[in-house]
Image (cartoon, helix red, strand yellow):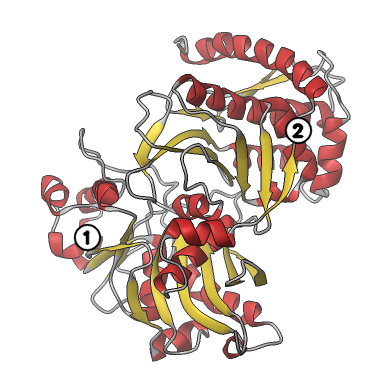
Amino acid sequence: MNGPEPCILSIDIGTSAMKGGIVSLSGELLSFTRVPLADTSRNDFLDWDSLIWDRALHELINLLSGRKTLNQYNIRGVVVSGNGPTLVPLGADGKPAGNTHLWVDKRERRIQGESSFFLPIASWIKENKSSVYDRTEIFLGCPEYVSFLLTGTYAGFTTTEAFDPYIWTGESIKTYGLDSEKFPKLFRIGDPMGRVTRKGSTLSGIPEGIPVFAGGSDFIMAILGTASVFPGRTCDRAGTSEGINYCSPVPVENSRIRTLPHVIDNYFNAAGILSSTGAIFEWFRRISGQKDKDYSLMLEEIREVGHTVSIPGFYPSLHRGAVWEFSGGLFIGLEADHGPEEMGRAVTNAIAYGVRDLIETLEANNCSVTSLRVSGGQGRSSIWNQMKADITGKAVEVPSIIDTELTGNSCAGFTSAGFFNTLQESAESLVKITKIHIPDKNEHEKYTEGYNFYHQRCRDVVKMMSGNDYL
């Protein structure tokens, strides 16, 4: 191959940061940067200003270029993924008609029996912010908005026809009593959206004329970016919350498992959700005075606490629903002589016990989990990944690019640019597993004793907090 290796410019918009990477055809991350968007400790997420993304995009590209210019890379396309369901009301002038309704904002008006994640938000806006609704020419999701900035093209992103109802359809828009012209047509992952316009280039710093392909929701692209695209493979994606995503050939019928169409046609994503796990760990770092402490040192001190029964327990506020909800959790058995290490052990045990419980639920429903392919910042911590392997009894696999949304975006871009025939083929080629944490048998047995005790006590704690048993 003559000249620089072909690359995809991948952008992922999280809740608290925007990440960007230049990924080569051989699956190497040639350049990476991260731009903070918000302070997660302040909960400044209601009525989000989408112009934050405009400014962050320009800064991201400037940092990503580094000492080179983007023209020195052989960029064959741009793909954007992002958080959701998030809805941006855009006016006829191409500027926000009102503040963005971010995914963490739970205000919505849902109609029973309807699947869309987005229309309940638009319905709430129409009912409660009618002037914003009236000024809105088009509603866009988060990655769709940034892609619009680059191309001027309106789009909604979906995976397969089976996934369309979870975005919107003409019939569901009508059921919600909304105006169909306010919702753009749906693009499949990898569909060509156009090219970076002169306006888009001026705003972002990306050279004019580079193709832009449709991306998708961050969790979907993370599944693709761990190559969890064949039955039996499981993606463990952690961020503000954590999701265990199992690729299944058939739908899973269980109230604790959310089953959605997979990114690959005719497969299903069977997912269990641990809500607010990342947020609760950051909360613990703050209240224990360890916000600026190195993660590795902190986790090493937590691990050294060992399997003593004298540590407190940290319990979720909701258990056995569709999620484990940790945002309202509490410590039980906290004593005066317990320090940050014991409290940290309680929190990390609770998170990994939740992962184990979800795995057991999946396996009880004919989903055999042999390993977890991790996604997100957790991939950087060998200590945490080994603890998770020991607690769950499953091998934990770490890919070379831990921000797997960036790899997933690249899979879509390279496939659409003609380098691969299918998304499965591109994922198998680009995803490189570089570290595997094997469970330690002795540690697993000790953790199992603690897990069984914790699991039983969860029943009593949740019943006490809610007045209902969790079964």
Closer to viewer: mark 2 or mark 1: 2
Marks 2 and 1, the one that precedes in the sequence:
1
Residue occupying image coordinates x 56% and y 33%: 327
Residue at 58% x, 62% y is 430
* Residue located beneath label 2 in the image: 387
Q: Looking at the picture, does residue 297 appear above or below residue 71?
A: above
Query: Is 53 in front, or is 363?
Result: 363
The label on residue 160 is none
In the image, residue 268 lies at what x, y percent?
38, 40
User: Left or right: where does residue 374 sit relative to residue 101?
Assistant: right
Report the front residue among 230 and 29: 230
- Residue 429 is left or right of residue 440, and the answer is left
Task: Check disc 1 and report its element: helix, strand or loop.
Answer: helix
How many numbered marks, from 0 up? 2
Badge 1 amino acid = Tyr
Q: Position of residue 463 (x, y in %)?
A: 51, 10
Name the amino acid type tagged 2: Met
Q: In what quadrant of the picture does the N terminus appear?
A: bottom right
Q: Is residue 149 depicted above or below 16 in this figure?
A: below
- The residue identified by callout 1 is 133
